[in-house]
Image: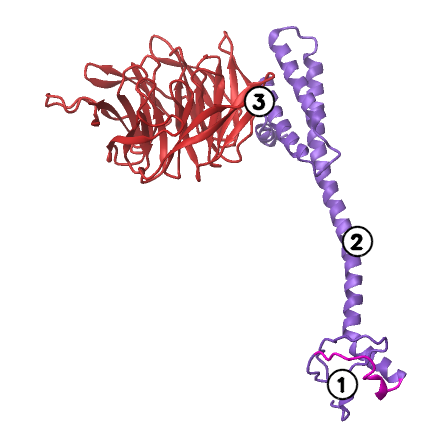
Amino acid sequence: HQAALRLLGQGGGSSSSPATRLSAHPDSRCWFVAWSPNGTLLASCGGDKAIRIWGREGDSWVCKSVLEDGHQRTVRKVAWSPCGNYLASASFDATTCIWKKNNEGFESLTVLEGHENEVKCVAWAPSGNLLATCSRDKSVWIWEVDEEDEYECVTVLNSHTQDVKHVAWHPTRELLASASYDNNICIYKEEDDDWECRATLEGHTSTVWSLCFDATGQRMASCSDDRTVKIWKEYPSESGDTSWKCVCTLSGYHGRTVYDVSWCPLTGALATACGDDAVRVFREDVTSNPEEPVFSLVAQVTKAHNQDVNCASWNPKEAGILASCSDNGELAIWRFKED
Amino acid sequence: MHTANKQAEVIPNLSGTTRSRRCFTSDFQCSGTVPVPFGQGRAMSGGADEDLFDNILLADERFRGEGFRDGFERGTRRGLQDGRRHGTSHGARLSSEISFYHGFAITWKCLLHHNTDERSRKRVKALESLLAVIQTVPLADPQSVELQDGTEKLRSKFRQVCSLLNVPMDFKEHFRSAEDMSF
């Protein structure tokens, strides 16, 4: 089947090309982009220590707010709370800032400290009550939020032996996954009032940069410095526990490190951000065996940016809209169309 | 020195078994191992001559053996001393770290003991959980895996409790300001 990935707005009849390639963080890197839960806003963060909120105005995307002075160093990732009213930002200054949306924009609510060095990722649990952060100090912290917006650290997990790059929550259960420079993925669950690592997924032969769950949470995709993307599936075992097995490895498609992977909750398409400047979209073959799925490359933009692509993120409400960002400070919004 | 009598190169063995001898770097310029069948060497010389050759030819080996045994004993004693010193310092460090956590937890528990608000109760619960982890760490066995795992778990737990209590883990700030003081 035919599919295309184009900058949003291009390929239409009009001569003017709407601004969907934006210089989001001039003279520095744009590290991450995140769509708000209702799909109308896009948050970007970068090496200029700022966070920018982008929104659609007509055919164009404009900067609605700038969140500055929240961090002393690069902002590495941002995450929206499930309700869309809060934004969490993870920074190399070893703190995580929680921002609250108000009429004018966003204000800094609180700053979570505790990590010994660069915080690499922050993620909200689907319940909205828990927040996970991970850091170069090899630990994963889980925080609990109460009704008064007070954040408390519930646990410090030290299951990795190196820098932890990414954390992601399961979409429906209170289960957390982390990816690390130690080539492994750890799965954490709460047991008897305490969180612990329940599984260590080995398989990648180099740093695992990112991971994400599919819409149902039965499968997980991970991407790595080893230039592959792995698909993992959960298998329940007799003891009531579960184990994750790698059911598919996508190799030979990426020329360099794969920095990010995003699984569209609406269409099931898989997008990747790569160090070879390309953005790629994969689709599972419908005929393939669910125990041994086969994914095919259906669309790619080989020069999506003119430097490393750091992030790829599907819009959670509008099917086929994909945002990406790069080391050159740019962010781009794409439309993925299948015939 | 070469003896005219070829048989003198042969090493007699009074016990009657055959054995080979290593070739020593000596003036004899021995050509290699020479197996001696029983009885062959005996006929040529008397008891005194045999001992003399034995002493000379086996001297190297004997001294080597003695030296090795002597050194081995000394090494064993030295190793015991080094090991004991290493164990003492390592044990002291670990023990003082764990005792620190213990004292820390007990003190804070005392301080928060009478507070009835929800936040304090949560903190007391966390401190109790820290004390529980301390109990599980097997200090008696330095080789046990549980010691390693338990210590890691304890350190993580301590960090979490510090976060809850709002106690900074890093005291560098305090030291720095103390240095600035002058009178």
Q: Main secondary structure of the magenta part?
A: loop
Point out residue A181 in the picture as x, y percentages from the top left corner: 46, 36
- Residues shaded magenta: B33-46
Residue drawn at the location 31% of the way across and 26% of the way down: A287
> Are labels 3 and 1 assigned to the same chain?
no
Q: Residue furthest bottom?
A: B4
Quadrant location of residue A307?
top left
Point out residue B44 in the picture as x, y percentages from the top left corner: 84, 88
> Are labels 3 and 2 assigned to the same chain?
no
Q: Amino acid at mark 1?
A: Glu
Quadrant location of residue A325?
top left
Q: Which residue is mark 2?
A: B77
The colour scheme of the drawn protein is: by chain
Would residue A117 appear left or right of A294 to someone viewing this image?
A: right
Mark seen at residue A239: 3
Q: Pointers 2 and 1 in contact (CB under 8 A)?
A: no
Q: Dot 3: what SS?
A: loop
- Quadrant, the C terminus of chain A: top left
Q: Is residue A92 above or below residue B109?
A: below
Spatial distance from mark 2 to mark 1, Cα to Cα? 42 Å
Crowdedness of circle 2 by 10 Å Cα count: few (<14), some, many (20+)?
A: few
Which chain is purple in the picture?
B
Would residue A307 appear left or right of A19 to someone viewing this image?
A: right
Spatial distance from mark 3 to mark 1, Cα to Cα? 78 Å
Q: Which residue is mark 1?
A: B9
Q: Is residue B69 magenta?
A: no
